[in-house]
Image (cartoon, rainbow, N blue to C red):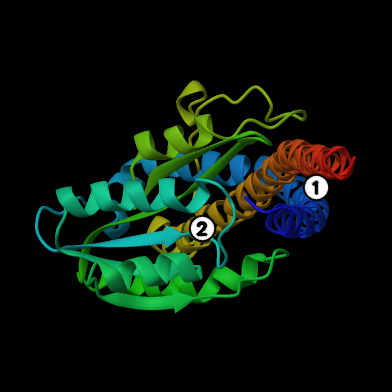
Amino acid sequence: MALKQVKNKIVSTQKTGKVTKAMESVSAVKMRKSQERAFAGRPHVHAALRILGRLSESQEGLSHSYAQKRTTGRQLLVIVTSDKGLAGAVNSSVLKRATENFARNPDTDVIAIGRKALEFAKREAKNVVAEYTNVADNVGLEKVHDITKLIMDDFKNGTYKDVAVIYQNFISTFEQEAIKRNVLPIDPEDINDVMRGIKPKEGKFSDNRSSKDVKTTYTVEPDAEEVLNTLIPQLVQIMLYHALLESKASEHSARMVAMKNATDKSKEVVKALTLVYNKERQASITAEVSEISGGMEAMK
């Protein structure tokens, strides 16, 4: 390889390293904020799911239309990904879980949250019921109101036999897990599974008990049907909100780690190329010195 080519490659790699370093810094800031939001929301989600779990175990909850299991109909799958790539396996692992789900349930419609989920659903030729892209990091509970209303209406009308969500669950900065959660019909076991995956660091919900640990009898006014019709959609909305928060925290954490690895790799490549450049340059200088010495000897 010519010296000029090696030099150009070194300069190019150094520029790439500067870009990945800048992206790492930006992702680190976003990561801290998204992690704080995810952790701050976990006790609230845990408490809401505990209420939902207890109500779903009551006689009124078990007989409610939102808790009735169905054997026929299509499935509605909510896929949560990021809009951008360069985030390691965050998106690919979610899409892998979605592919496995499609294999088991071919008759599946999709609500795509994130550009990667939308592109994937179109590639798989799935019916996209709704799409949401460019979702801000500081997503609020009201942002998922439209999604929740769509889900609840279609399930109540009998369009779908069940509704599930696939997203990245945040475990730590270096570890995330793509999981599938059943949303409808309401099932106490599914709710307890979600609760076991939420582990607040502190507070009265840090014991992470399931709703089965405490039996509570509720006096419901004006009547159980009206209360459940209002409460269940709100709690399903909280479940979707939790999925978005966890996905955002996972995305920025994975991107920060990916950019850090890319920056470290660029430094290794620059070091190796510099060594090659120095060897080639030294060999060139040695050859030139030899030619000069040979010419001088010939002149004598």
For label 2, the crowd category at 10 Å Cα-Cα, with few meaning under 14, some 14 to 19 and many 20 or more, is many
Q: State whether residue 27 is above or below residue 277.
A: below
Outermost residue to the left: 72
Q: Position of residue 32 (x, y in %)?
A: 80, 47
Examine the rendered structure and indicate whether residue 76 appears above or below residue 186.
below
In the image, taking residue 18 as reference, residue 123 lies left or right, namely left
Residue 251 lies, in percent from the top left, at 61, 52
- Percent position of residue 222, x then y: 48, 62
Res. 45 visible in picture = yes
Quick one: 167 or 14, which is closer to the camera?
14
Helix, strand or loop at mark 1 = helix
Q: Nearer the viewer, mark 1 or mark 2?
A: 1
In the picture, the quarter occupied by the C terminus is top right
Identify the residue shown where x is 50% and y is 75%: 132
Q: Amino acid at mark 2?
A: Leu
For the point 62% across and 41% down, the residue is 47
Find residue 266 and report its image quarter: top right
Task: Name which of mark 1 and mark 2 comes first in the sequence.
Answer: 1
Residue 184 shows in the view: no
Q: Along the line of sight, which residue is nearer the eye, 55 or 38?
A: 38
Label 1 to label 2: alpha-carbon separation? 21 Å
Amino acid on which the number 1 mark rests in the picture:
Arg
Q: Quadrant of residue 260?
A: top right
74 horizontally vs 114: left or right: left
Q: What residue did someone put label 2 on?
A: 240
- As drawn, the label of residue 32 is 1
Q: Residues within 10 Å of mark 1 (few under 14, many from 20)?
A: some
Residue 26 position, x and y percent, is 81, 57
Mark 2 residue element: helix
Q: Nearer the viewer, residue 194 or 266?
A: 266
Q: Is residue 47 above or below residue 65?
A: above
